[in-house]
Amino acid sequence: MKLSEMAIGKCAVITAVKLQEFYLNRLIKMGVSVGSKVKTMAKSPFGQTVEIKVKGVRLALGKNIAEGITVKYD
């Protein structure tokens, strides 16, 4: 399932990240990588951004980036 499809308050593990190298390198520096546990904290009213918590840090990701991240519920 895509990160953008996760329900608010649910936890999952990242299983794949399929993004352009620029975004991929930036996300890895922020702790978003395969095997990391993430929790969906909030979504914008129209679903254009997703707020997640990964390794104790909250990040807001655009929908296009969140759709490139595949997760699996714990």
Image: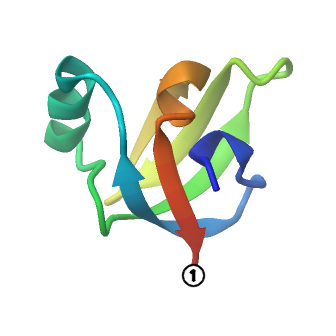
Dividing the image into 4 quarters, which one contains the N terminus? bottom right
- Res. 25 image quadrant: top left
Question: In the figure, residue 49 lies in which quadrant?
Answer: top right
State the image coordinates of residue 4 (x, y, percent, origin top left).
Answer: 65, 39
Q: Is residue 31 left or right of residue 59?
A: left
Relative to residue 12, is residue 42 drawn left or right? right
Which residue corresponds to the image point at 69% horizontal and 65% vertical from the top-left? 10
Q: What type is the residue that disc 1 sits on? A: Asp
- Compared to residue 17, the image places residue 20 above or below, namely above
Is 23 left or right of 6, judged from the image as shown? left
Residue appearing at x 19%, y 28% in the figure: 26
Q: Where residue 17 sits: x, y (%)?
A: 35, 45
Taking the spot 53% from the left edge, 34% from the top edge, the residue there is 66
**Residue to which mark 1 is pinned:** 74
In the rendered view, tell whether residue 1 sits above or below residue 69.
Answer: below
**Residue placed most toward the observer, 38 or 20:** 20
Image quadrant holding the C terminus, namely bottom right
x 31%, y 60%: residue: 55
**Which residue is outermost to the bottom?**
74
As rendered, which of 42 and 24 lies closer to the eye?
A: 24
Residue 34 in picture, x, y percent from top left: 29, 60
